[in-house]
Image (cartoon, grey):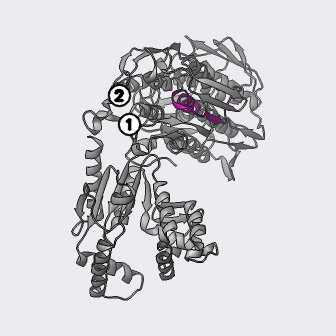
């Protein structure tokens, strides 16, 4: 799942290596879905990308009457059912919301204009700024009835049934704004090809590899388009779609670019292996590999895999025509930060009509990192960072180093690679859900950082101070891992007894060996041991007694210290306990000592126990807490006390949200220094 936080702080990264399995191609996924809907019968789609863009397409197909059935990892699509002449699919007036998915808006506009029926197509605000006028003009040549509901030339649109279609003359469409206009016509016209239907492209066709994808997909669904260069395309008379039965979606070559770049920048010990796309890919963005090689990457490839290592360092400067790989070329702009001279990316005018004006966006954000950038109507020139890079990421506080992502998935993914030059804050990281929901989790699986660079927030405090509630919520807000150290001894006792080990000194080393490899996770208030949820099992009275017994074994205590250190993983950690800031993570960047009066803590604990049906009194609880505080403060090993550099937070009169806000404010202040 995508990080749902307002921002994601990436610490300085130092290396890369490992295997990445890529999600399906967005461009292929949405083409396959629409083609499956337009042909009769049933099509089973394997390896479909699960993302925002494919979800809006699937929602649209359901609204049009398609059957969409999930079959394990595959999806079964039954085509749009036949309807009376002029009514079109979906019956009545159908409203479709298509988000910011150009691969849904443009092809659906063309298909629905020819199928008949009444529709309204809309999207997010940015979609209403992305041009569609050239496609509408082409469809109107056929007799399609399409009206703009807002600004002329842009969505939202209203489509009404056309009384008759004019197929005799060639259909003219511009090719120099977006190749999706031509793709939309190519996918829609087989629906009405009772005679040869010809499309003439006006101007230089951009992004030709995306048209190659379209032609390849049409062929898979039974339509063979005749092509004369890149200027004329003919759909033969009698063309009609036929389901291939089953079809597999190739992995996304645009998404591969981030990991190809990662290997070129940082994989010097072992390669970054990318599975799901390789030398035989039908996607134009696979040519990004050639660009990476030109910059010095060492690449080996097979039919369905790539392996990339760092070669030349710094990377070599390049001057490239990027028209054939517009999406992947954005990654080159960030690779240019590490080059030995200025890099120029040319013929990228289509960037300006994508999810955002990508030329302006990339120029603005690269300048934040200290690069010199020159932009034009269709080019970007990036002069790299000084060597070593000037750590400008922290200048001006949070805003001076924060990468604005413009609700554009590719901006967010590109700039994650800038973390090899220093810390980076990615604003709105969840925007990657458009094409690669698990991007950051995947990235963290193959990159490394020096342990001291992985941030830790330590929250210590006495029993019932609310440190677990506070720490887990701070971790959630930051997208960091969470460690409930107080649960570890209980989990250790639970795991040992489940393994049949007596909790005594005779089995001390066996228990320690077991504990060292325990697969523990803390997620959303639940505790997991492997796939088993143990939240309730470790809160029993017997579990508490077992925890006391294993805590008396020195080898087990040592194993648990090492286990706690293992929670320090990218992108960061929030750990709560009694000695997190003093013993376990003395180098934590932020240390909080959380406390509240004994009376307040007794009242909180009383409410908790009463809600569980456990009878007790506030006076009894207060006496127990005061006695425990005294024991914890005076114990010989790791006594409970604030670290010398801890910030004290008395939450006696605070709601949880107030305490969380205070810690997040302190964290921002620490990050900005």
Determine whether 282 is above or below 401 in the image: above
Q: Earlier in the sequence, mark 1 or mark 2?
A: 2
Badge 1 local density, few (<14 within 10 Å), some, or many (20+)?
many
Left or right: where 80 falls relative to 356: right
Q: Position of residue 409 (x, y in %)?
A: 47, 36
Front residue (pair 204, 489) = 489
Could you tell me which residue is drawn at 34 percent across and 65 percent down? Answer: 467
Residue 591 sits inside the magenta stretch: no
Per the image, is 278 magenta? yes
The picture quadrant where one finds residue 404 is top left
Name the residue beneath numbered marker 2.
369
Q: Is residue 614 above or below residue 82?
A: below
Q: Position of residue 602 (x, y in %)?
A: 29, 79
Instruction: Specify the segment rendered in magenta.
Output: 256-281
Q: Is residue 97 left or right of residue 31?
A: left
Residue wearing tag 1: 424
Give how far across and how far down residue 430 sits, in percent: 45, 44
Across and down, in percent, residue 89 comes to 63, 42
Q: Marks 1 and 2, Cα distance to the nearest angstrom? A: 9 Å
Q: Residue at x 21, y 68 (%)?
A: 653
> Front-most of 382 and 12?
12
* Dot 2 crowding, Cα within 10 Å, few <14, some 14–19, many 20+: many
Element at label 2 = loop
Q: Are marks 1 and 2 in contact (CB under 8 Å)?
A: yes
Secondary structure under the numbered disc 1 in the rendered image = strand
């Amino acid at each position: 799942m995508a990080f749902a936080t307002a921002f994601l702080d990436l610490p300085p990264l130092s290396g890369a290596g490992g295997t990445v399995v890529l999600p399906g191609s967005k461009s292929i996924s949405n083409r396959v879905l629409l083609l499956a809907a337009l042909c009769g019968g049933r099509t089973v789609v394997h390896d479909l990308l699960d993302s925002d863009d494919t979800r809006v397409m699937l929602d649209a197909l359901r609204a049009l009457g398609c059957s969409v059935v999930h079959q394990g990892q595959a999806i079964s699509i039954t085509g749009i059912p036949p309807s009376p002449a002029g009514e079109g699919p979906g019956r009545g007036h159908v409203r479709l919301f298509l988000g910011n998915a150009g691969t849904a808006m443009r092809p659906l506009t063309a298909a629905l204009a020819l199928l008949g029926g009444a529709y309204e197509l809309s999207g997010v605000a940015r979609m209403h700024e992305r041009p569609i006028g050239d496609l509408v003009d082409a469809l109107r040549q056929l007799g399609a009835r399409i009206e703009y509901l807002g600004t002329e030339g842009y969505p939202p649109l209203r489509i009404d049934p056309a009384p008759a279609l004019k197929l005799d003359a060639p259909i003219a469409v511009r090719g120099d704004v977006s190749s999706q206009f031509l793709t939309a016509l190519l996918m829609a016209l087989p629906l009405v090809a009772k005679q040869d239907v010809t499309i003439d492209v006006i101007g230089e066709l951009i992004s030709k590899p995306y048209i190659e994808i379209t032609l390849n997909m049409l062929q898979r669904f039974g339509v063979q388009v005749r092509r004369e260069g890149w200027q004329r395309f003919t759909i033969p008379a009698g063309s009609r779609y036929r389901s291939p039965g089953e079809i597999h979606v190739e992995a996304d070559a645009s998404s591969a670019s981030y990991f190809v770049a990662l290997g070129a920048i940082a994989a010097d010990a072992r390669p970054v292996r990318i599975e799901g796309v390789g030398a035989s890919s039908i996607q134009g963005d696979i040519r990004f590999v050639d660009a990476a090689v030109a910059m010095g990457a060492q690449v080996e490839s097979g039919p369905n895999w790539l392996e990339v290592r760092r070669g030349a360092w710094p990377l070599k400067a390049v001057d490239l025509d990027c028209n054939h790989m517009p999406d992947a070329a954005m990654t080159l702009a960030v690779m240019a930060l590490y080059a030995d001279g200025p890099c120029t990316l040319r013929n990228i005018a289509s960037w300006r009509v994508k999810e955002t004006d990508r030329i302006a966006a990339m120029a603005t954000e690269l300048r934040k990192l200290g690069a010199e950038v020159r932009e034009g109507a269709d080019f970007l020139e990036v002069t790299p960072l000084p060597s070593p890079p000037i750590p400008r990421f922290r200048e001006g506080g949070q805003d001076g180093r924060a990468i604005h992502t413009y609700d554009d998935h590719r901006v967010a993914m590109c700039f994650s690679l800038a973390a090899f030059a220093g810390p980076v804050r990615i604003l709105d990281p969840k925007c990657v859900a458009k094409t690669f929901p698990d991007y950051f989790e995947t990235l963290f699986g193959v990159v490394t950082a020096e342990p001291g660079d992985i941030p830790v927030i330590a929250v210590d405090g006495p029993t019932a101070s609310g440190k677990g509630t506070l720490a887990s919520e701070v971790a959630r807000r930051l997208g960091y891992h969470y460690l409930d150290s107080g649960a570890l001894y209980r989990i250790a006792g639970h795991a040992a007894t489940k393994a049949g080990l007596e909790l005594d000194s005779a089995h001390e080393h066996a228990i320690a060996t077991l504990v060292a490899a325990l697969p523990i996770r803390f997620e959303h208030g639940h505790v997991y041991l492997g796939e088993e949820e143990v939240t309730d099992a470790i809160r029993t009275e017997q579990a508490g007694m077992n925890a006391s017994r294993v805590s008396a074994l020195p080898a087990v205590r040592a194993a648990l210290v090492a286990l706690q250190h293992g929670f320090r993983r990218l992108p960061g950690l929030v750990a709560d306990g009694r000695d997190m800031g003093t013993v376990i993570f003395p180098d934590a960047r932020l240390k909080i000592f959380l406390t509240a009066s004994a009376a307040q803590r007794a009242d909180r604990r009383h409410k908790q126990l009463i809600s569980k049906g456990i009878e007790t009194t506030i006076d009894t609880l207060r006496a127990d807490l005061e006695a425990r505080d005294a024991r914890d403060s005076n114990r010989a090993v790791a006594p409970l006390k604030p670290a010398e550099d801890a910030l004290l937070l008395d939450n006696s009169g605070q709601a949880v949200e107030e305490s969380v806000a205070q810690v997040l404010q302190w964290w921002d202040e620490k990050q900005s220094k």
